[in-house]
Amino acid sequence: MTNRVFHRIPSPGWILIVAVCLGFAGFTGHMWEDYFITFRASLNLATGHGLVFQPGEHVHTFTSPLGTLLPALLALGDGAEVAVRALWLFRIVSAVALASAIALAARTMTRSGLAPFALVAACAAWSLDPKTVDFSINGMETALLVLFIVAAWRALADGARLLPTAVAFAGLQWTRPDGCVFFAALAAGWLVFGATENGPGRAERLGRLVRGVALGGVAYLPWVAFAWWYYGSPLPHTIMAKVSHHGPGELGPALLLYPWRLLFGHTALHDVFMPAYSFFGGWPPALAWYSRVVVVIAAGGWLVPAMRPAGRMASLAFFLGGFYVEYIPRSPWYYPGWQALALVASAFLLDAALRTDLKPRAQGFVRLARGAGIIFVTVQAALLASVAWQMREQQSIIENGHRREIGLWLRAHAAKGDRVYLEPLGYVGYFSGLKMLDYPGLSSPEVVAARRAGHRPHADLIAVLQPEWLVLRPDQARGIAADRPELLTKDYRLEHGFDVRAQVDSIRFLPGRGYLDFDAVYLVFQRTAQAAAPR
């Protein structure tokens, strides 16, 4: 009976997941910084200015085609609140997508015969995961990505029939250019664990994968052709602007030692169940161990023979994904897709623990497994509540009352053709409407070109680009003053300081306080007339 909770759509479980997402959105009002990067392009498309961040500049400033085209389609009406209206419609689409992903996974697990407790515990933990819920409602493409990851896992578990495999692969690519990485990890898991007694051999399975990817690639080809024609490259400019977070000579050893460090050291994968930007502080240290334990168990599940093949496939894909997570920047929006695979693997692992045949001696182990499942759901629920409180304050103080106000102040004080150098591109860029010279250059080929020419510190980039305005955090200003003392005293003058530290400090209970502290102060500098004059 319990297995039927997610059996049909809509079902009580499906409706509950949608309610959790939209309830989180209503309580927090959270609108992610990067939403305003993509929505500026969405709004320009909707208003006839082209799919660009800056009208007249054909720069591919977004990563997700669907994550940008859908909000453009939903940008109804005009006025200052068009971004909010479009986001609420996108939230509904995303909540439905996430609920459908979990329902599809649950139906596949039900068909595999998973124990009801394992199914419900894993789906409940998934539905309450704070990053998955937050990034499904704050303007990111996360829910769509999770849906197509689950669709790919389901298609492969069903034998990689042509159409479902092609749809899943195409959906992944339309959602993110690196969607193929998720598919490749799952495909590797299927090649290893997809054999059945009367099913296709490995050569036939490989052939099915090739045919599915080929057909899916044809469905994705129109976007590739458009981007190549419109932007001059099929690769998003955002990818070309980003660099690995590893120093010279670090990446090779990091990838080579990843399996060892997964057990005995630290890898990026260990952090995927942590709250977003937890490294800024304000969370209990025990959470790091919680995330590590969940990750190691899920990533090592494929080594357990008692685990059903579909679960071993998801577990191996999650383990292989650790190599990719080690390579890319450690940004929290990259994690929910891999968490989806970990949560699927966790359900199958819990099922294997509950199905043990050791009889009397197994009863203690079964009770332990049930206790672990209850703890997992409880911690996820507590984290979701804590993150909801954190993001409510983040949105109110930092986003609406701070970064949005910086953008509006610049709109009122800057000239039409002025350029702004800064790192937080979203709110300031959208609400100012000005030309942005952002670091690392997501919307700015000029910054990317200057960095490639060897001008990497902020001070050097500012000296070369000579923007009319600077929006800096205090630590950035101190670094610039140390590198080029005259830059912020002679060439630029401080025009306005934006400081909300008192508001942040006044909140007694604030999980993840360090995340708000990081953006609590900004300094706005204007280029002096003396520096702007021809020399």
Image (tube, rainbow, N blue to C red):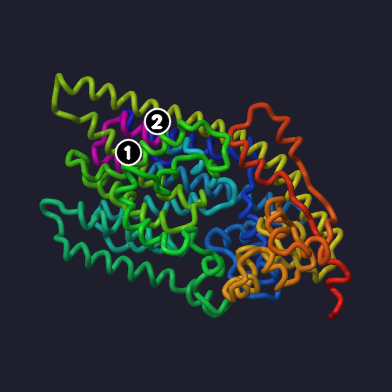
**Quarter in which the N terminus is drawn:** top left
Q: Amino acid at mark 1?
A: Ser
Nearer the observer, 89 or 372: 372
| Residue extent of the magenta highlight | 105-123
Lower sequence index among marks 1 and 2: 1
Nearer the observer, 511 or 14: 511
Per the image, label 2 sits on a secondary structure element best described as: helix
Q: 285 left or right of 484?
A: left
Magenta stretch: includes residue 518: no
The residue singled out by tag 1 in the image is 346
Per the image, label 1 sits on a secondary structure element best described as: helix
Nearer the observer, 225 or 393: 393
Q: Is residue 23 shown to the viewer in this render? A: no
Q: 383 left or right of 505?
A: left
The residue singled out by tag 2 in the image is 376
Q: 27 left or right of 150?
A: right
> Do the numbered discs 1 and 2 sit on residues whose CB atoms are within 8 Å?
yes
Q: State whether residue 159 is above or below residue 272.
A: below
Give the class, few, some or many, for how many residues have Cα within 10 Å of label 1's Cα (few <14, many ≥20).
many
Residue 488, how many percent across, how many down? Answer: 79, 61
The structure residue drawn at horizontal position 40% and vertical position 30%, both measured from the top left corner, is 376
Residue 112, how many percent across, how many down? Answer: 24, 41
Q: Amino acid at mark 2?
A: Phe
Q: CA distance from mark 1 to mark 2?
A: 10 Å
